[in-house]
Image (spheres, helix red, strand yellow):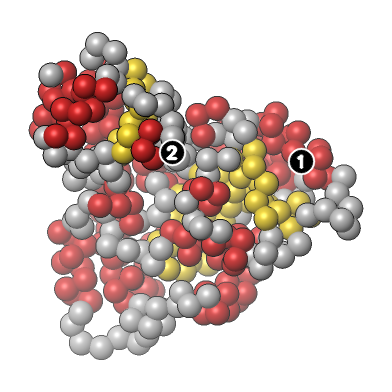
């Protein structure tokens, strides 16, 4: 009954097997391994983007921060939702990698940027003088930190606003697979066809040991990215172990199957909570994160039985009856049902 984070899930056997295969013999370092050649080709195929530049890093924070560094100069600002991971969970790493640039927060319900709110901040920013931060980029998170998703049409509408203001666009896809499964969109429809310039393509939250891809749909800044990655200490020497994870992740669409299981478990959890007396959802459940309220006695019973999840009162001083529950590829129906039984008493 582990619902604290999808980062805590085990690694699928397919990925461990791929790492064992990669461990045989010698390979060139720093991304020159032969496995990476296949990963690069496969991601270009998956995204219908034959010219895209593809790079691997070990963490989502590195993927996001290096990407935003490409889009935003030190005197600029990046617009993001106020609950975005780059704002609340990355310890100012984006600002560090952008050389001191700032984030400008945008409101919107359920973790999604509201187009009217974005227009309002862009209108203020477009009047900026030498005394003000200069508008540079928009970053969206899909799936969002509140467990909702953007459809391709919603992304396209927001990126059109951004590009109309001369901004670059980035998608934080730490849970990109969960968003795709939820919407039924293709990877291309969710990204470059919807106006996204750079994608952080997540793997760690969806079962990998630790690897994320950065995909530049316009490769013009690829040389700069390589320098930023090295200067930022995120170029792995034994890169083949990153490549092997991503190879297994993409093989046979494992990444989508893993996300599908996580999403189904979240839906089962959400349906069970709403059936309880006093149970309610705080946000729509569209991916693998559930924000819900249920009686305090239910919190106590579940915790006493060993369930792991975050109460919002302890997490951020939020609702005393609220909880954040995250499912993963390895969450089973039995775990969900046992947890729901504890909540029911």
Closer to the camera: disc 1 or disc 2? 2
**Element class at badge 2:** helix
* Residue 98 on image: x %, y %: 64, 65
Where is the C terminus found, in terms of image quarters?
top left
**Left or right: where does residue 7 sit relative to residue 21?**
right
Q: Could you tell me which residue is drawn at 44 percent across and 35 percent down? A: 317
**Left or right: where does residue 102 sit relative to residue 60?**
right
Q: Could you tell me which residue is drawn at 41 percent across and 82 percent down? A: 30
* Residue 199 on image: x %, y %: 52, 55
Crowding at label 2, few (<14), some or many (≥20) Cα neighbours within 10 Å? few
Numbered mark located on residue 66 in the image: none
Q: Can the viewer see residue 242 in this picture? A: yes
What is the CA distance from the residue labelled 1 to the residue labelled 2?
29 Å
* Residue 170 on image: x %, y %: 58, 52
* Residue 99 on image: x %, y %: 66, 68
Residue tagged 2: 316
Q: Could you tell me which residue is drawn at 29 percent across and 47 percent down? A: 6
Q: Can the viewer see residue 189 in this picture? A: no
| Mark sitting earlier along the chain (1/2) | 1
Above/below status of 226 relative to 70: below
Residue tagged 1: 122
Q: Could you tell me which residue is drawn at 47 percent across and 51 percent down? A: 89
Question: In the displayed image of the protein, which residue is found farthest to the top?
Answer: 277
**Element class at badge 1:** helix
Crowding at label 1, few (<14), some or many (≥20) Cα neighbours within 10 Å? many
Mark 1 near mark 2, Cβ–Cβ under 8 Å? no
Where is the N terminus found, in terms of image quarters?
top left
Q: Nearer the viewer, residue 179 or 101?
A: 101
């Amino acid at each position: 009954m582990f619902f604290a984070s999808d980062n805590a899930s085990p690694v699928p056997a397919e990925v461990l097997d791929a790492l064992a295969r990669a461990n045989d013999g010698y390979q060139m370092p720093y991304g020159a391994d032969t496995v990476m050649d296949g990963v690069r080709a496969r991601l270009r195929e998956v995204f219908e983007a034959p010219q895209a530049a593809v790079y691997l890093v070990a963490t989502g924070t590195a993927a996001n921060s290096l990407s935003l560094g490409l889009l935003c100069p030190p005197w600029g600002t990046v617009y993001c939702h106020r609950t975005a991971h780059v704002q609340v969970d990355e310890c100012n790493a984006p600002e560090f990698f952008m050389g001191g640039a700032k984030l400008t927060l945008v409101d919107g319900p359920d973790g999604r940027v509201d187009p009217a709110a974005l227009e309002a901040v862009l209108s203020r920013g477009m009047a900026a003088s030498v005394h003000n931060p200069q508008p540079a980029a928009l970053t969206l998170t899909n799936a969002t930190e509140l467990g909702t998703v953007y459809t391709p049409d919603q992304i396209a509408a927001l990126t059109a606003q951004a590009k109309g203001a001369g901004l670059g666009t980035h998608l934080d896809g730490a849970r990109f697979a969960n968003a795709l499964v939820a919407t039924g969109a293709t990877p291309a429809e969710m990204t470059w066809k919807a106006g996204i310039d750079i994608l952080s393509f997540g793997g760690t939250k969806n079962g990998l040991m630790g690897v994320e891809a950065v995909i530049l749909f316009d490769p013009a800044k690829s040389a700069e990215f390589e320098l930023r990655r090295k200067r930022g200490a995120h170029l792995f020497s034994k890169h083949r172990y990153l490549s092997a994870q991503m190879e297994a992740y993409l093989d046979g669409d494992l990444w989508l199957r893993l996300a599908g299981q996580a999403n189904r478990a979240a839906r089962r959890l959400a349906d069970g909570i709403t059936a309880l007396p006093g149970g309610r959802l705080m946000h729509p459940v569209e991916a693998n994160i559930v924000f819900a309220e249920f009686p305090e006695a239910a919190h106590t019973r579940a915790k006493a039985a060993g369930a792991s999840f975050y109460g919002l009162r302890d997490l951020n001083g939020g609702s005393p009856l609220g909880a954040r529950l995250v499912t993963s590829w390895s969450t089973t129906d039995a775990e969900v049902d046992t947890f729901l039984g504890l909540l029911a008493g």
